[in-house]
Image (tube, rainbow, N blue to C red):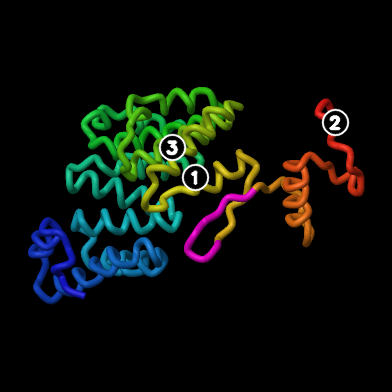
Amino acid sequence: MTLGELSPEVRNELTSLPKSLAELVGRHMAMIGRLLDEDPERAYEHAAFARRRASRMGAVREAAGIAAYTVGKWQEALSDLRAARRMTGRDNFLAMIADCERGLGRPERALEIARDPAAGDLPVEDRLELRIVAAGARRDMGQPEAAVVELQVPELKERRARPWVARLFYAYADAVLAVGRRKDAREYFARASAVDREGLTDADERLAELEGVEIVDVGEDVVWTDAEDPYVEDGAEDEGEADAAEAAEGVPRSEEGSTAPADPER
């Protein structure tokens, strides 16, 4: 683990600390980046330590807020992310801030944040993430149709495989399913599955559920099977092959032993 794992912006900010403290905080910051996806609880512990030692660093408050958000500590995450926004002047935390309000049972405030004028200047992935949160807030408020409207954006026509595309398609599929539009839900779960190369969603499973099939893991392959098919007993396949062969010869199995040709009208 080295400070070289940190971004240049974070390394530059660390220079405001005494050297020994900068190295200590930097090591914990690097561990947050390493662990956030695979072990968020441990990442949170490293973030909490860094926050105690350098709470006036915007990068530390950002990392602490993201780590707290990842483990569902909504109030703590909200406090740190708001502080990070003030200290850094960046607005790319808006979606997480809004989602924290949802987590705290305040969907109306989440919608207020989604309408922040700064949202219009966000990169497309952050802007769409904010839309997804707003749609969730609408559903929290018992407004499923309004949730669909929140997600009706031009990017629904996007064809390139990008992480934010998969999340948008998935959110839209889930929203239209909630209002009974199963056909549209199948279409967008399928689109999400097609572009979700990083496994960010369970679009495959949701699509399989709608189609009435189950996903079977066979080694490195994934096979979809008909979940409604009855169990086929041993020998059934042989009988099916025999039926096919006899049909080709014009002799139904029900007339075994007869030399009369099959009735073509039957």
Of callouts 3 and 1, the N-terminal one: 3
Q: Which residues are magenta?
A: 218-225
| Circle number at residue 263 | 2
Quadrant for the N terminus in the image:
bottom left
Question: In the picture, residue 250 is in which quadrant?
Answer: top right
CA gap, disc 1 and disc 2: 49 Å
Q: Position of residue 113 (x, y in %)?
A: 35, 33
CA gap, disc 3 and disc 1: 9 Å
Q: In this rendering, is residue 72 above or below 24?
A: above
Camera-near label (1 vs 2) is 2
Residue located beneath label 3 in the image: 191
Of callouts 2 and 3, the N-terminal one: 3
| Circle number at residue 27 | none
Residue located beneath label 1 in the image: 203
Amino acid type, residue under disc 3 in the picture: Arg
Which one is nearer the viewer's eye here, 232 or 126?
232
Determine crowd level at label 3: few under 14, some 14-19, many 20+ residues with C-alpha closer than 10 A.
many
Amino acid type, residue under disc 1 in the picture: Ala
